[in-house]
Image: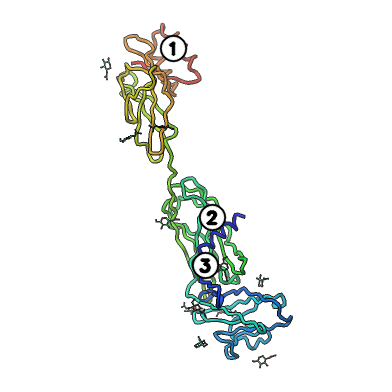
């Protein structure tokens, strides 16, 4: 199912350059040194129908193939279809640019015309991308090549050698596949499934090479594509406010609150609010909010970018707990070790009871006690 869908995608590109007119001779294209498979069928002829190919005109001088007389075969042509099955499919081998012409196939009284153009080189392969070119998005790349002659199909392969070697591409191990189209033509495809795009893939080149066996060697046709990986834009998320004391634990005079989040595009504005009984009071703009350690309260920050905003949860209880020469600030945080060192600092035993009570209250959510 997957393959067929992609395969149809492949063809939209090929069809747009097709020169088929619907009238006159059927248009076919091959390239120098290769062969051409001509799909062909007929109806309602006698069982021993004779098929004859002519080049340019249907005169005896121009006869190049006779299905009933081998001595009249002038050029490398092979009838691959079974005439008794009403199949007149033919392959022309070893074509050169000079062979471009209109060819005629006669079957009793019927004449079919084929305009065959032999180009110097094969067409470029076509790469299609299924999936959005976003960071973290899953894409499937398909490279396909119209194959004029399934008797000598190309080998398709991905080439990422121009991109940094550290980049992951999930290149397929298998060979390219030859697929028969409903109208009798053929296509060779190779896929790169489920590539997870990162920003590292942005603007990195990936090439698809089609290598054709031709008379006397290999002919390569290639296409290069650059992935344009856009970043997914989102409003701030994981917004967090954190606390630190500037200037060391014991001598500090200021508390610093820092607001952080992930956002794309980056956060443009930060606002700090203090929770009060009258509601939130806007106290500061900027990602860092510092204030005198003697202040206290509940705070939270809000981060904005053009896509939205997000508030942090209210940060700890920033309260003056004790007053013993200097205030003790109690702040919700994540470092119980600091708490232990404060216990040490509190060698005055009449505080021990209070501190141990705090330990039991906050064991599920470690706290730091700052003494100033
Ligand atoms: C066969 O169909 C494909 C599209 O599926 C088209 O690109 C190709 O030109 C067709 N070939 C002929 C001989 O009509
Ligand atoms: C076509 O291929 C033949 C070999 O099959 C080669 O001698 C000739 O130079 C080629 N012509 C062009 C125009 O590439
Ligand atoms: C094809 O036949 C026409 C006459 O029908 C003639 O004028 C022309 O030169 C021929 N072309 C070739 C390549 O032989
Ligand atoms: C085959 O073609 C040759 C040359 O045109 C002719 O001499 C011969 O009689 C033909 N043979 C048959 C069986 O028709
Ligand atoms: C095509 O040409 C090559 C080299 O000239 C030759 O070996 C081969 O037999 C030819 N193929 C056919 C079908 O005549
Ligand atoms: C005609 O014969 C060719 C070559 O054997 C084959 O690929 C094709 O499928 C046949 N076409 C039909 C309609 O049977
Ligand atoms: C055959 O195709 C060529 C190029 O595609 C074109 O110039 C020419 O007129 C066509 N001949 C016929 C008889 O359709
Ligand atoms: C990526 O962008 C470049 C330059 O704008 C463009 O040439 C190329 O086709 C784009 N690639 C894709 C896969 O859209
Ligand atoms: C963000 O800051 C800019 C300038 O600094 C200002 O124009 C804009 O209104 C602010 N946006 C919000 C949501 O506060
Ligand atoms: C903090 O406040 C106290 C008392 O109000 C004052 O003595 C001290 O200088 C202030 N410290 C700073 C860093 O502003
Ligand atoms: C913040 O986002 C909420 C929705 O999440 C919106 O209602 C509110 O207006 C936004 N505030 C600002 C200042 O943009």
The reply, left or right, for residue 337 in relation to residue 82 is left
Which of 251 and 113 lies nearest the eye of the viewer? 113
In space, the residues marked 2 and 3 are separated at their CA atoms by: 18 Å
Tell me which numbered mark, 2 or 3, is placed earlier along the sequence: 2
Residue 238 percent coordinates (x, y) = 44, 32
Per the image, the residue denoted by label 3 is 211
Q: Residue furthest front?
A: 23
Per the image, the residue denoted by label 1 is 355
Q: Which mark is residue 291?
A: none
The correct choice, above or below, for 102 with respect to 15 in the image is: below
Q: Residue at x 56, y 71 (%)?
A: 148
Per the image, the residue denoted by label 2 is 192
The correct choice, above or below, for 70 with respect to 301 in the image is: below
The reply, left or right, for residue 334 in relation to residue 66 is left
Q: Residues within 10 Å of mark 2 (few under 14, many from 20)?
A: some
The reply, left or right, for residue 164 in relation to residue 156 is left
Q: Secondary structure at mark 3?
A: strand
Residue 5 percent coordinates (x, y) = 58, 57
Q: Disc 1 beta carbon < 8 A from ligand 10? A: no
Which of 249 and 105 lies nearest the eye of the viewer? 105
């Amino acid at each position: 199912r997957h393959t067929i869908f992609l395969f149809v995608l492949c063809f939209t590109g090929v069809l747009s350059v097709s020169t088929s007119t619907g009238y006159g001779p059927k248009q076919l294209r091959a390239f120098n040194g290769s062969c051409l498979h001509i799909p062909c069928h007929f109806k309602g002829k006698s069982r021993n129908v004779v098929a004859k190919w002519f080049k340019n005109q249907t005169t005896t001088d121009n006869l190049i193939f006779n299905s009933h007389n081998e001595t009249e075969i002038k050029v490398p042509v092979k009838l691959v279809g079974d005439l008794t099955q009403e199949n007149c499919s033919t392959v022309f081998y070893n074509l050169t640019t000079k062979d471009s012409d209109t060819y005629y196939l006669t079957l009793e009284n019927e004449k079919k015309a084929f305009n065959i153009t032999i180009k110097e080189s094969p067409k470029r392969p076509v790469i299609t991308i299924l999936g959005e070119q976003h960071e973290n998005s899953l894409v499937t790349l398909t490279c396909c090549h119209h194959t004029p002659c399934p008797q000598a199909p190309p080998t398709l392969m991905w080439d990422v050698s121009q991109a940094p070697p550290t980049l992951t591409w999930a290149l397929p191990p298998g060979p390219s596949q030859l697929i028969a189209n409903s109208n009798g033509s053929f296509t060779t495809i190779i896929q790169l499934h489920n590539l997870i795009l990162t920003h590292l893939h942005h603007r990195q080149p990936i090439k698809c090479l089609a290598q054709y066996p031709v008379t006397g060697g290999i002919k390569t046709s290639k296409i290069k594509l650059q992935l344009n990986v856009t970043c997914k834009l989102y409003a701030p998320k994981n917004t967090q406010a954190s606390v630190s004391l500037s200037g060391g634990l014991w001598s500090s005079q200021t508390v610093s609150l820092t607001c952080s989040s992930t956002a794309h595009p980056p956060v443009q504005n930060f606002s700090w609010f203090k929770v009060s009984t009258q509601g939130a009071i806007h106290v500061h703009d900027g990602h860092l909010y510092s204030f005198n350690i003697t202040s206290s309260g509940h705070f939270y920050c809000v981060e904005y970018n053009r896509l939205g905003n997000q508030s942090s949860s209210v940060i700890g209880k920033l309260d003056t707990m004790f007053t013993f020469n200097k205030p003790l600030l109690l702040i919700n945080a994540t470092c119980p070790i600091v708490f232990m060192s404060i216990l040490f600092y509190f060698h005055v035993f009449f505080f021990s009871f209070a501190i141990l009570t705090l330990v039991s209250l906050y064991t599920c959510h470690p706290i730091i006690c700052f003494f100033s």
